[in-house]
Amino acid sequence: MNLAPGSAAPTTKPVKMTATPRPILRGAVNFPVMLAPMVGLSHVSLRMAVREYLPQGAITMWPTEMLNSRRLPIERFDLVPEILRSPAETHMVPQILGNEEEPIRKSVARLEGEWGASGIDINMGCPVRKALSHNYGVSLMGDKGYAAEVVRMTVRHTSLPVSVKLRAGKGESGTQFLLEFAKGLVEAGAESLTLHPRSAEQKRRGKADWEQIRILRENVPCAVIGNGDVQTAEDALRMLSETGCDAVMVGRALTARPWMLWQLGEDLGSWAPPIGREGELAPRTSEEEGREYARFALRVLSLMQEFHPPREKAHWSEELLVRKFRFFLKNSAPWLYYGHDLEARASRATSLSHMRDIVSDFFYGPQAASQPMSARTDLRY
């Protein structure tokens, strides 16, 4: 990854990468942190709001929510919230669930030709029961040969780079199984792997075993992206340093602290501030971050109104959008000292405009108090 030139002075001494990064998206990616695909969260409004914190010149991968390959061939891309994208979005890598060649063939053809994907990601890390019942997600990790064939059939039908998101192996033999499993995926054509080093049974419990990321990176020839227990810019830098991974994928913490991208640009050195924030330094103190969260939350709400307008016969309504914004708050507000109060108030919203009034009053109303952020929260919920 070549660091892009910029004008902002880092707030700390620039951090040096400990390993020579391997190419992601065939070398298009030059910034080592990215948003994770998350059900109900990685939609166009959130992606666009997070993207506004990316340093100038930085390029990273952008996900979708999980997309079912059985439905993709027949869905209206302009009507389904999970597929909706902005024309301004680049380096998009939709994540698909699937295990059958014909639906995968039709899905990737539409995503590559009609939707404009830059890559295809296969989910082998989802432990949700609904995915498991169809032998999608992490259930594919139960059969190394079958999983490799899913990659092979995807590669067969696209010219785009194919990546896989997976979970850790289970038990004492888990690491060896993981390595054998991963090597099968690479031999089948996977060009990068993302590892969340918890087993399916753990879900979000326990501590992510970053050592498995290091071992995987040392034993496969492709790029390895680490995921799990990253809540701050310091966590991301530590994962890069301790594991040697080529990039870090961040989930819910990036929905609460998207300026982590800006902070990392400063910490890595030579990255200019995001467009529109020239001459500023990234928020760092608890109070600065709390103020920035208010700005970000209202921006997400504005983008939801812009990109997801209620439409006749569409797959969404204003009620759905209100629920989506509540879900965003449920996942991001826990980092606020009084986030539970914001969530409680938001539960009373009856429309997007009502929601905007509630959020604005919480942060800026006559009775509003300072809303600092904590560096960490409990990620087990």
Image (cartoon, rainbow, N blue to C red):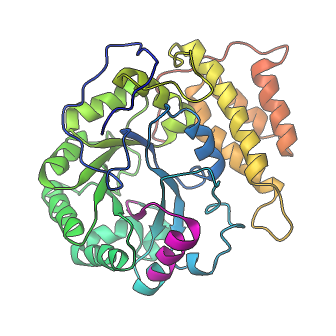
Residue 101 place in picture, x, y as percent: 40, 84
Count of numbered badges drawn on the protein: 0
Residue 36 place in picture, x, y as percent: 46, 48
**Lateral position of residue 161 relative to residue 369, left or right:** left
Camera-side residue: 58 or 43? Answer: 58
**Lateral position of residue 9 relative to residue 259, left or right:** left
Quarter of the figure with the N terminus: top left
What residue appears at the point 24 percent right and 25 percent down from the top-left corner? 16
What residue appears at the point 75 percent right and 21 percent down from the top-left corner? 363
The answer to whether residue 39 is above or below residue 160 is: above
Camera-side residue: 156 or 249? Answer: 156
- Residue 119 in magenta? yes
The answer to whether residue 161 is above or below residue 73 is: above
What residue appears at the point 56 percent right and 40 percent down from the top-left corner? 51
Residue 221 place in picture, x, y as percent: 16, 56
Does the rendering let one see residue 45? yes
Does the rendering let one see residue 337? no
* Quarter of the rendering containing residue 207: top left
* Quarter of the rendering containing residue 245: top left
Camera-side residue: 52 or 185? Answer: 52
* Quarter of the rendering containing residue 370: top right
What residue appears at the point 40 percent right and 51 percent down from the top-left corner? 203
Residue 313 place in picture, x, y as percent: 83, 71
Magenta stretch: give its range: 105-125
The answer to whether residue 44 is above or below residue 84 is: above
The answer to whether residue 151 is above or below residue 18 is: below
- Residue 294 in magenta? no
